[in-house]
Amino acid sequence: MSAPDSPDSRDTGLEFAPDFVIGSATASYQIEGAAHEGGRTPSIWDTFSRTPGKTWNGDTGDVADDHYHRLESDLDLMADLGLEAYRFSIAWPRVQPGGSGPANATGLAFYSRLVDGLLDRGIRPIATLYHWDLPQELEDAGGWPNRDTAFRFAEYAAHTVEALGDRVHTWTTLNEPWCSAYLGYGSGAHAPGRTEGAAALAAVHHLNLAHGLAVQEIRRLAVADPDVSVTLNFHVARGDHETSPEARRRVDALANRAFTGPMLRGTYDGDLIGDTAGVTDWAFVRDGDLAAIHQPLDVLGVNYYSTVTVRMWDGVSPRARNDGHKDMGGSPWPGSEHVEFLPQAGPFTDMGWNIAPDGLEELLVSLHGQFPGLPLMITENGAAFPDEVVHASGGARVPDAERVDYLRRHFAAAHRALARGVDLRGYLVWSLLDNFEWGYGYSKRFGIVRVDYDTQVRTVKDSGRWLSQLIRSRRIPELDVPSVRARPL
Ligand code: IFM
């Protein structure tokens, strides 16, 4: 925390325009639970989390936040917080069990109630079609390295947009395809846990293709004029070693341009193809694919948490691997394994990720420069900290001062980007609720609302109250957290 008289206190009072959308985000498998209800079939995350050693404590999303059964009260909570937008994801195996065939009316009915409940409360729904819960049957058929999965995704997108496209205006195709491809098929830290570099790169391409095909389905089926987007987790790479520029170029090619290249420019850059030549010949890219992927977008979703510091490995000293992800044996950097990820300066969140709000400003300014005319939205930003509940005379509280400070610094960075001319349309805090943090199970808490996993009781944290105050006042609130929590919701 910075002292009130530190230079950071100048952030207090910075103002956001009335049309700057402020809200929060979640994802289906992380919060819904009800894994075996309403016709839902297993996803790769059900299988992976049941595999010994894959998640912390063997945790699964079977119950999670039980959001499926607590929809109405969670919607009321969002309204109490004053959220202007809520970004959620739709579970493919709920809507199209098994990943092919007709839509499941029960699954769609759940999301229909969610959307109606948001609209009734004046909250804008932002729907993500894919936040990692691939139907297990499609993985059994080859998963994302299999070309057919992209066409199955387009079919699922059509079912979903047909059902909800009269009420959902903003659609996001994929969340963080970097994780789906490189953690799912390269490092093995995410479902399905494969460690095959060539498969990871094939997955990259088929996720890109899935995105392009789904955009076309959204435009074909959505009523009115939808805002179509994709959410990417950009890597902001730094480093001052003489080999850092080469390492940064490689990370940018593999992590960022592997997606923005085809999606936003209609091409895979030559250096990406060259860097990965020892892994794949990219023969999976067929005639017409790039045109299918390169669809006009209305907004680009930006997920940002921290930076990486890189240089090329000298081949002698032990190689540093501080890229912020669990080491499960495989490499999430196919063809660039000799990029070294160095330890960074703190402070750190509970994920061990460095806190670097200037990285957010740098990223937003850079994206605006690379893709002028494409509006940006921060679709995720937030932090895990080991919160505690305290019981005071006014009831239970969660004094998460570190998260408040993290958010304040990042909102201020977003404000600086706006002042530098970036067309930034909004900011969605990750996450509304503490939830299933993938390989880390329930050991990491990102919520602005605490969830007691034994009782499912929700307690708004000080950060939730702070965000609520920001939304209502349009200004970054005072650093004085007690005054925030004294305010009734
Ligand atoms: O919880 C995840 C989310 O599912 C995707 N983006 C990063 C978050 C924090 O790790």
Image (spheres, rainbow, N blue to C red):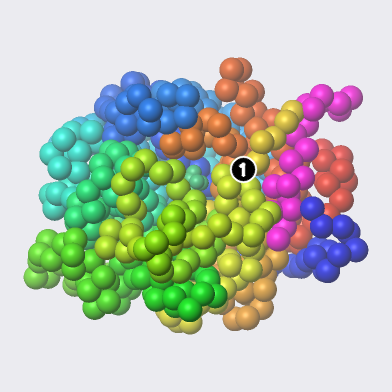
Q: Give the residue displayed 82% in from the left and 57% down from the top.
A: 2
Closer to the camera in the image, 466 or 2: 2
Q: Quadrant of the C terminus?
A: top right
Secondary structure beneath label 1: loop
x then y, percent, for residue 59: 45, 25
The residue drawn where x is 19% and y is 61% is: 279
Judge left or right: residue 158 versus residue 353. Answer: left
User: Is 410 situated above or below 74?
Assistant: below
The x and y percentages for residue 444 are 57, 36
Q: In the picture shown, does residue 145 fall above or below 309?
A: above
Residue at 59% x, 81% y is 421
Which residue matches tag 1? 350
* Residue 377 visible: no
The answer to whether any part of residue 391 appears in the image is: yes
Q: Residue 465 is drawn in which quadrant?
A: top right
**392 part of magenta stretch:** yes
In the drawing, does residue 74 fall left or right of residue 485? left
Name the outermost residue toward the top.
Answer: 454
Q: Position of residue 287 (x, y in %)?
A: 9, 70
Seen from this angle, which residue lies furthest front?
Answer: 316
* Circle 1 residues within 10 Å: few <14, some 14–19, many ≥20: some
Taking 199 as reference, is 401 left or right?
Answer: right
Residue 207 horizontal side relative to residue 75, left or right: left
Viewer-closest of 343 and 365: 343
Give the image location of residue 254, x and y in percent.
33, 65
**As displayed, is residue 388 above or below residue 338?**
above
Q: Residue at x 90, y 63 (%)?
A: 5
Q: Amino acid at mark 1?
A: Asp
Residue 28: quarter of image: top left
Which one is nearer the viewer's eye here, 259 or 218? Answer: 259
Magenta stretch, residue numbers: 390-409
- Is residue 148 a member of the stretch shown in magenta? no
